[in-house]
């Protein structure tokens, strides 16, 4: 049960939207959650018997440890959703991790160190050198996908042990299953490893496509104020992206190297797009925004099929306000190549635009305005995963296994990631700065003086009361109000009361 001091604190919590932080007696963070009404949501944890029914033992165990609760007020539920996700990623509270891990989504595990790697369904990812794909929240979907992979590529699902024959090849099945699956039953280990390589590449593409679909669904849920659904999708996306990041460092050792795949993609693009020279130097642009707010753009660069992160650029939209992908694309493409032209630097061999015909024409328009030659340019339409060419009315549809298309998809996904990271940073900064909006007596002029004095929100939240009182235009009463408002953010590691 909560202490009398905690009960009193809960009774005086604000009733607006925000994020709440549960702490134990030592000040360690137990859990971060969001709420439409902070007072009602926090109080609900302490209703008698609430969490001891319906399989909520973990919540009940957490409630017994709660000694203090801090809150961070924001303007609306959307900001609460974003801030909650940001704080969970940054602080990794114990019980947030337990609740997510408890979902136990299915993964596909490939034991790449085996002579005959097999594809198996598991519920836990271990640091064992294997490749993992997922997590997949829909078990029926992943099981169907796995069986389709066996039919399509002839891989093994852990239901047999290949036996070596006198001729040196291996026999996969001793019964009629090879006839059902429609692939040769006797083959070398190298030939089987080629099957695994192709299946993993296909599965990687499936996961990336599903990831983009989940992000789109999360944005739509947030825009329609379905915040609980958006939060569930956000958790799945985070888990999936973590898996992909770990997976990127564990390549299938017997497969083609990334450089081999990149070279194949470059050659294939030259042929399919009928380019005069190999597209060794490619730049890709993407626009990112949330319902027209925080509009930003990214440019990523690949050379010989590999990312050149020092050459990446990100842009804020300067020349207009609002949500217009076409104007945004025209602006950032124009700014990028005006600068390269003025500095006498070479233009890329190929420009990739994340978008359809409208975005491609907007990029072309920037070259007409600048009156400089335009390199070959192509768009990658998200829905069809087909290519948009300026001088062709219909879409160019390549095979999903086409190495050139896979190279362009890598570029597009990297540009999308880079733009979304910048967008999230700006949203987080705006959310933090918005905490000062409701302080009486702190208008835009004094706020500007504060940021000029402390240079950043990070420095401001760590400022002492004396330092605030010494700031230009900030008296003792106003300094005290600012200090109290930012108390929740002052030091995430020391467990101080919020």
Image (spheres, grey):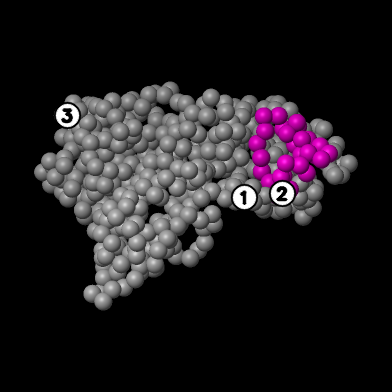
Q: CA distance from mark 3 to mark 2?
A: 59 Å
Give the left or right position of residue 309, taking residue 435 as reference: left
* Residue at the spot of label 2: 58
* Residue at the spot of label 3: 392
Residue 79, compared with residue 124, is above or below; it is: above
* Residue at the spot of label 1: 102
Q: Are marks 2 and 1 in contact (CB under 8 Å)?
A: yes
Q: CA distance from mark 2 to mark 1?
A: 10 Å
Q: Secondary structure at mark 2?
A: helix
Camera-nearest label, 1 or 3: 1
> In the image, what residue occupies the spot 55% across and 34% down?
230
**Mark 2 or mark 1, which has the lower sequence index?**
2
Q: Residues within 10 Å of mark 1 (few under 14, many from 20)?
A: few
Whole-percent x and y of residue 375?
Answer: 18, 38
Q: CA distance from mark 1 to mark 3?
A: 51 Å
Boundaries of the magenta span: 30-57
Whole-percent x and y of residue 392?
Answer: 16, 29
Whether residue 384 appears in this view of the structure is yes
Whole-percent x and y of residue 450?
Answer: 61, 36
Residue 277, compared with residue 196, is above or below; it is: above
> In the image, what residue occupies the spot 60% across and 44% down?
87
Which quadrant would residue 113 be assigned to in this image? bottom left
The residue closer to the viewer here, 491 or 32, is 32
**Mark 1 or mark 3, which has the lower sequence index?**
1
Whether residue 470 appears in this view of the structure is no
């Amino acid at each position: 049960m909560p202490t009398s001091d905690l009960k009193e604190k809960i009774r005086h919590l604000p009733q607006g939207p925000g994020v709440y932080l549960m702490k134990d007696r030592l000040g360690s963070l137990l859990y971060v959650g969001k709420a439409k009404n902070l007072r009602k949501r926090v109080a609900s944890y302490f209703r008698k018997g609430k969490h001891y029914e319906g399989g909520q033992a973990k919540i009940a165990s957490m409630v017994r440890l709660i000694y203090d609760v801090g809150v961070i007020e924001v303007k609306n539920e959307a900001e609460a959703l974003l801030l909650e996700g940001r704080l969970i990623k940054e602080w990794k509270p114990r019980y947030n991790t337990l609740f997510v891990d408890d979902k136990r989504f299915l993964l596909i595990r490939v034991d790449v160190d085996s002579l005959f790697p097999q594809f198996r369904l598991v519920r836990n990812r271990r640091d064992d050198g294997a490749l993992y794909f997922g997590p997949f929240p829909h078990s029926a979907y992943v099981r169907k996908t796995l069986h389709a992979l066996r039919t399509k590529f002839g891989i093994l699902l852990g239901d047999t042990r290949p036996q070596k024959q006198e001729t040196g090849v291996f026999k996969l099945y001793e019964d009629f299953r090879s006839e059902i699956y429609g692939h040769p039953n006797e083959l070398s280990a190298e030939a089987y490893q080629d099957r695994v390589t192709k299946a993993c590449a296909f599965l990687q593409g499936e996961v990336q496509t599903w990831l983009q679909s989940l992000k789109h669904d999360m944005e739509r849920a947030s825009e329609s104020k379905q915040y609980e659904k958006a939060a569930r999708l956000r958790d799945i996306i985070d888990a999936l992206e973590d898996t992909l990041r770990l997976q990127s460092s564990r390549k299938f050792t017997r497969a083609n190297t990334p450089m081999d795949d990149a070279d194949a993609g470059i050659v294939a693009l030259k042929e399919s797009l009928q380019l005069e020279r190999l597209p060794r130097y490619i730049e890709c642009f993407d626009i990112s925004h949330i319902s027209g707010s925080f509009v930003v753009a990214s440019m990523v660069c690949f050379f010989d099929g590999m990312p050149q992160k020092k050459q990446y650029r990100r842009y804020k939209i300067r020349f207009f306000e609002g949500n217009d992908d076409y104007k945004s694309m025209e602006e950032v493409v124009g700014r990028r190549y005006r600068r390269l032209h003025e500095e006498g630097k070479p233009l890329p061999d190929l420009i990739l635009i994340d978008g359809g015909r409208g975005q491609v024409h907007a990029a072309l328009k920037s070259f007409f305005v600048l009156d400089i030659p335009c390199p070959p340019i192509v768009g990658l339409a998200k829905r069809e995963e087909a290519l948009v060419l300026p001088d062709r009315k219909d879409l160019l549809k390549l095979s999903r296994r086409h190495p050139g298309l896979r190279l362009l998809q890598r570029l597009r996904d990297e540009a999308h990631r880079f733009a979304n990271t910048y967008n999230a940073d700006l949203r987080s900064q705006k959310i933090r700065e918005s905490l000062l909006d409701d302080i009486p007596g702190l208008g835009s002029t004094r706020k500007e003086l504060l940021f000029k004095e402390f240079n950043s929100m990070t420095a401001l939240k760590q400022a002492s009361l004396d330092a605030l009182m010494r700031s230009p235009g900030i008296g003792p009463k106003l300094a005290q109000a600012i200090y109290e408002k930012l108390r929740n953010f002052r030091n995430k590691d020391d467990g101080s009361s919020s």
